[in-house]
Image (cartoon, rainbow, N blue to C red):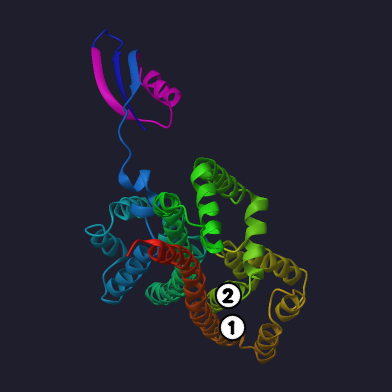
């Protein structure tokens, strides 16, 4: 952070300036060590940049790192040194990423390795990315590692995107349908109720039920909003706790079809991560550690950590996986074949491809079932409201004078 100061030198000359320091105490120490007597010292307040205020929207995202990796790999293949390749990358792209690259370049100019410089910026470069960079530097194949990593991350993002979209669709439809139904109950039905009361006719049972529901909504809408908001806030806060995240993730895996989408997608990404890192020369134990850190679902992450502990104790990877009911038996059998043949990397790639196809098939099944199910559910509610209203309207027509 920056501080503006006014101070006097030993001969009484007044000076002003701006300095960088971690805190106000650090700034004071810097000035005192410089032989200055502080008159005034204050922190310079400035609005945060967009990428600092809204990192999820304007910060560094996975697609930025993918594009960066491909670009740098191409520049390195063209014979351009790493420092110049990074300098070229600072000319375009997001401001947040350009700022990180400038710090990486400064570290390289001070003698750091590329992997060491990237390791300081975990928001952009996760641990597994840094491990792979380090391996590429050691074997002298940095461009090849960057290409493979970019391809791996791209496939990972594509699968995650499919899973999120498959889960987002029914959620959005349900929210919109609920909003439309509440609007009808609070606005449309009460207006028609006044019309029905003017004729004084006995209303059909369905209409009376509909009016009762509408009256309940209209009388308690504020309480319902408060309760729903409080429940939503409570669930949100709970799912931010360690126990809440764990229970939510375990529950998601147990939901029919949805759970299979999440589980198979998670296993596919896990196997691909292990395959890529083992192929790059990272030890199996370190690969399992990194794979667990990049796994979003805490239930799957917990199982990976248990398997890692068993492997560290000398258990075969296939045996550690087969002992956990979360991992399918087919996976452990295919891993065992890879261990026996000495081709674990290739076998894990096959496992990953298999479960990617399984996850996509589950996504297709989910969307195929949810569309008609939501149509029937929403259509049934709307049909009930329509029948209740029109049956009363027809009854009013019969009593109108001819």
Residue 125 visible in the displayed image: no
Q: Are marks 2 and 1 in contact (CB under 8 Å)?
A: yes
Q: Nearer the viewer, residue 42 or 186?
A: 186
Question: Toward which corner of the image does residue 161 lie, by quadrant?
Answer: bottom left
Dot 2: few (<14), some (14–19), or many (≥20) neighbours within 10 Å?
A: many
Which residue is located at x 66 percent, y 92 percent?
341
Question: Toward which corner of the image does residue 338 lie, by quadrant?
Answer: bottom right
Q: Secondary structure at mark 2?
A: helix
Question: Toward which corner of the image does residue 1 lie, by quadrant?
Answer: top left
Residue 358 visible in the displayed image: yes
274 above or below 237?
below
10 above or below 345?
above
Q: Which residue is situated farthest in the front direction here?
A: 402
Q: Which mark is residue 53?
A: none
Give the labeled residue for mark 1: 348
Was residue 29 drawn as part of the magenta stretch in this picture?
yes
Judged left or right of residue 328, residue 47 is left
Give the labeled residue for mark 2: 274
Q: Secondary structure at mark 1?
A: helix
The segment highlighted magenta reads 14-37
């Amino acid at each position: 952070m920056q501080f503006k100061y006014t101070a006097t030198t030993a001969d009484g000359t007044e000076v002003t300036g701006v300095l960088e320091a971690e805190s106000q105490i650090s700034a004071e120490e810097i000035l005192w060590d410089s032989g200055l007597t502080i008159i005034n010292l204050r922190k310079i307040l400035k609005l945060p940049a967009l990428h600092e205020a809204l990192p999820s929207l304007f910060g560094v995202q996975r697609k930025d790192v993918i594009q960066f990796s491909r670009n740098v790999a191409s520049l390195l293949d063209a014979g351009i040194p790493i420092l110049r390749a990074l300098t070229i990358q600072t000319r375009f792209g997001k401001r947040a990423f350009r700022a990180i690259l400038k710090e990486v370049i400064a570290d390289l100019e001070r003698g750091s390795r590329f992997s060491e410089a990237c390791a300081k910026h975990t928001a952009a470069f996760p641990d597994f990315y840094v491990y792979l960079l380090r391996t590429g530097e050691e074997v002298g194949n940095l461009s090849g590692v960057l290409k493979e990593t970019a391809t791996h991350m791209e496939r990972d993002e594509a699968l995650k995107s499919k899973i999120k979209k498959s889960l987002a669709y029914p959620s959005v439809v349900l929210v919109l349908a609920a909003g439309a139904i509440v609007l009808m109950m609070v606005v449309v039905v009460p207006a028609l109720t006044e019309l029905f009361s003017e004729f004084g006719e006995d209303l059909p049972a369905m209409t009376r039920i509909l009016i009762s529901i509408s009256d309940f909504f209209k009388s308690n809408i504020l309480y319902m909003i408060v309760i729903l908001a409080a429940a939503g806030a409570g669930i949100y806060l709970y799912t931010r706790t360690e126990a809440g995240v764990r229970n939510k993730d375990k529950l998601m895996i147990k939901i029919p079809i949805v759970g299979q989408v999440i589980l198979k997608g998670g296993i596919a990404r896990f196997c691909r991560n292990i395959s890529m890192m083992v192929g790059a020369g990272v030890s199996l134990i370190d690969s399992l550690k990194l794979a667990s850190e990049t796994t979003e679902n805490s239930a799957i992450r917990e199982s990976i950590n248990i398997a890692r502990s068993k492997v560290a104790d000398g258990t075969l990877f296939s045996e550690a996986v087969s002992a956990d009911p979360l991992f399918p038996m087919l996976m452990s059998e295919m891993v065992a074949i890879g261990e026996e043949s000495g081709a674990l990397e290739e076998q894990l790639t096959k496992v990953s491809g298999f479960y990617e196809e399984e996850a996509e098939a589950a996504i297709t099944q989910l969307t195929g079932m949810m569309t008609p199910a939501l149509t029937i559910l929403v259509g049934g509610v709307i049909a009930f409201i329509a029948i209740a209203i029109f049956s009363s309207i027809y009854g009013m027509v019969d009593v109108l004078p001819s």
